[in-house]
Image: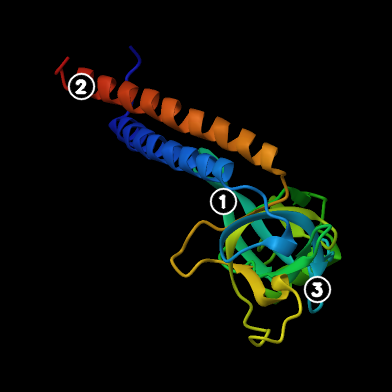
Amino acid sequence: MIPIHPVYLIAGFGGGIFLFIKGFFWLKKKRLIENIPTSKIRSIAMGLVEVYGEVVPWKGVLKSPFSNKECVYYKFSIQEHRRTGKHSSWVTVKTGEAGMRFYLKDNTDKVLVDPTEADVNVSQDYAFSSGFGKDPPLAIKQFLKVNNMNFESFLGLNKQMKYHEYFIAPKDKLYILGTADDNPFVKDGNSIKNAEDIMIQKGKNKEIYMISDKDEKGILRSLTWKAFGGIFGGAVLTIGSLIIILIDLKLL
């Protein structure tokens, strides 16, 4: 048998346990989503709710940092290809996100949403790679300059870099599972409709809060595969690593 470095075995054992536990977390989330019916916005009640609708700006919009698109939320990452001796890898050198409150609208009404602290899972909207003979666009150059970063090395050659951007734009369709609580921007008794008195947000007891551009079926499908891979893959990795460790220690 080809010898495996002990560090990799320990990492495999620990990683397997992590995946195994994470698999049950994904399974629990899947069952929670299955057990909560999707509410029409006009009739949502206080507490944990599931809604689906279209994004409508509340008080203006943001501009995404790389593609300069109008949005109500964005997150980004920048990676740089680095070499150390004989090895090279992509290293994440900067990440960030920003968001603002927005309305979610269905065919019955609209409700205010505060994305702060939400687990936002949306598809990648923009990606760019810069490198030898390929400069990043002006918007990215300006972003790097403001953040004291450079796409060039000290020799003036372009670094190999990747830029990824995800955002929520007006009219995007969203699935949201979060806590319906008091809307702090509406005085009690001043609202005409039920939904005006409510803002979907992170619960005070840190309940689950997720925002996704997938519909419920897509989310459940993804969680099913994650749970299966985490539980069974984690178990196989943990047991396999443990067996090899015991063999190396001549305990088997």
Q: Which mark is residue 22?
A: none
- Give the residue number, with chain letter if any, for mark 2: 246
Residue ID at (68%, 42%): 216
Q: CA distance from mark 3 to mark 2?
A: 58 Å
Q: Nearer the viewer, residue 42 or 70?
A: 42
Q: Quadrant of residue 169?
A: bottom right
Dot 1 and dot 3 residues touching (CB under 8 Å): no
The amino acid type of the residue labelled 2 equals Leu
The amino acid type of the residue labelled 1 equals Val
Q: Which mark is residue 61?
A: 3
Picture coordinates of residue 142, whole percent (x, y): 78, 71
> Of callouts 3 and 2, which one flags the residue occurring earlier in the amino acid sequence?
3
Residue 184, compared with residue 117, is above or below; it is below
Picture coordinates of residue 78, whole percent (x, y): 65, 57
Which structural element holds mark 2?
helix
Quadrant including the N terminus:
top left
Residue ID at (43%, 66%): 205
Q: CA distance from mark 1 to mark 3?
A: 31 Å
- Give the residue number, with chain letter if any, for mark 1: 91
Which structural element holds mark 1?
strand
Residue 3, compared with residue 211, is above or below; it is above
Tag count: 3
